[in-house]
Image (spheres, rainbow, N blue to C red):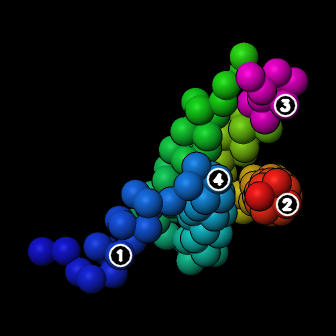
C-alpha cells in the first residue's frame, strides 16, 4: 500500500513541466551523490554503490535525452559534461575516494544553477509576452 507521501510524490512528478522534471533530475543526482559521500565517510560500501548507481542512472538519462539536432553545440558540450560526471562517479565507486564525487557534485550544481536561471528567464519572457 502506498503512503500519502509516495502518492503525492508520484503525482508531482507526473504533473511537472519538462523544465521542472529537468531540475528535479539534477536535484536527485546531487542528493544521491551527496549521500554517496556520506556512505564513503561511514565506510558503507553497499550504500556507496547504491547511491552512486542512482546518480549514474540519472546522468545517463540526462545524456540520453539530449537532442543534438536541435541543441547543436550546447548538446555536444552537455554530453561531454555528462560523460565527465559518469567517469567521476565510476571512479568514486571503484576507488571509494570522495574527491571524484565532489568533482561530480560541483559540475552538477553548476549545471543545476544554470538551468534554474534559464527556466526563470523563460518564465519571465513568457509572462511578458502575455
Instruction: Looking at the image, tell me whether mark 4 or mark 2 is earlier in sequence order.
Output: 4
Instruction: Looking at the image, tell me whether mark 1 or mark 4 is earlier in sequence order.
Output: 1
Numbered label attached to residue 128: 2
Q: Mark 4 and mark 2: span between their CA atoms?
A: 19 Å
Numbered label attached to residue 74: 3
Residue placed under numbered mark 1 in the picture: 8
* Local SS, label 4: helix
In this rendering, is residue 70 above or below 96?
above
Which residue of the protein is positioned furthest toward the bottom in this rendering?
4
Q: Mark 2 and mark 1: span between their CA atoms?
A: 32 Å
Instruction: Looking at the image, tell me whether mark 2 or mark 1 is earlier in sequence order.
Output: 1
For label 3, count other residues whose C-alpha is less than 10 Å away and answer few (under 14), some (14-19) or many (20+).
few
Give the position of the C terminus as an image quadrant: bottom right
Q: Mark 1 and mark 4: span between their CA atoms?
A: 19 Å
The stretch of residues the image draws in magenta is: 70-79
Residue placed under numbered mark 4 in the picture: 19
* Local SS, label 1: helix
Q: Main secondary structure of the magenta part?
A: helix
Q: Which residue is drawn at 67% across and 25% down?
A: 67
In this rendering, is residue 45 above or below 88?
below
Instruction: Looking at the image, tell me whether mark 1 or mark 3 is earlier in sequence order.
Output: 1
Front-most of residues 11 and 100 = 11
Front-most of residues 53 and 48 = 53
Q: Where is residue 7 in the image (x, y as percent from the top left)?
A: 29, 73
Instruction: Looking at the image, tell me whether mark 4 or mark 3 is earlier in sequence order.
Output: 4
Instruction: Give the mark toward the camera: 4 or 3.
Output: 4
Q: Mark 1 and mark 3: span between their CA atoms?
A: 34 Å
Q: Which residue is drawn at 72% across and 43% down?
A: 85
Q: Where is residue 66 in the image (x, y as percent from the top left)?
A: 66, 30
Amino acid at each position: 500500500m502506498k503512503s500519502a507521501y509516495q502518492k503525492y510524490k508520484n503525482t508531482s512528478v507526473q504533473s511537472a513541466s519538462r523544465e521542472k522534471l529537468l531540475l528535479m533530475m539534477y536535484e536527485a543526482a546531487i542528493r544521491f551523490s551527496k549521500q554517496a559521500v556520506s556512505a564513503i565517510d561511514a565506510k558503507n560500501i553497499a550504500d556507496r554503490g547504491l547511491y552512486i548507481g542512482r546518480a549514474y542512472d540519472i546522468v545517463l538519462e540526462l545524456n540520453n535525452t539530449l537532442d543534438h539536432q536541435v541543441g547543436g553545440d550546447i548538446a555536444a558540450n552537455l554530453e561531454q559534461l555528462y560523460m565527465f560526471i559518469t567517469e567521476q562517479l565510476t571512479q568514486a565507486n571503484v576507488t571509494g575516494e570522495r574527491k571524484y564525487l565532489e568533482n561530480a557534485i560541483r559540475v552538477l550544481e553548476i549545471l543545476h544553477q544554470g538551468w534554474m536561471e534559464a527556466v526563470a528567464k523563460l518564465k519571465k519572457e513568457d509572462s511578458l509576452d502575455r
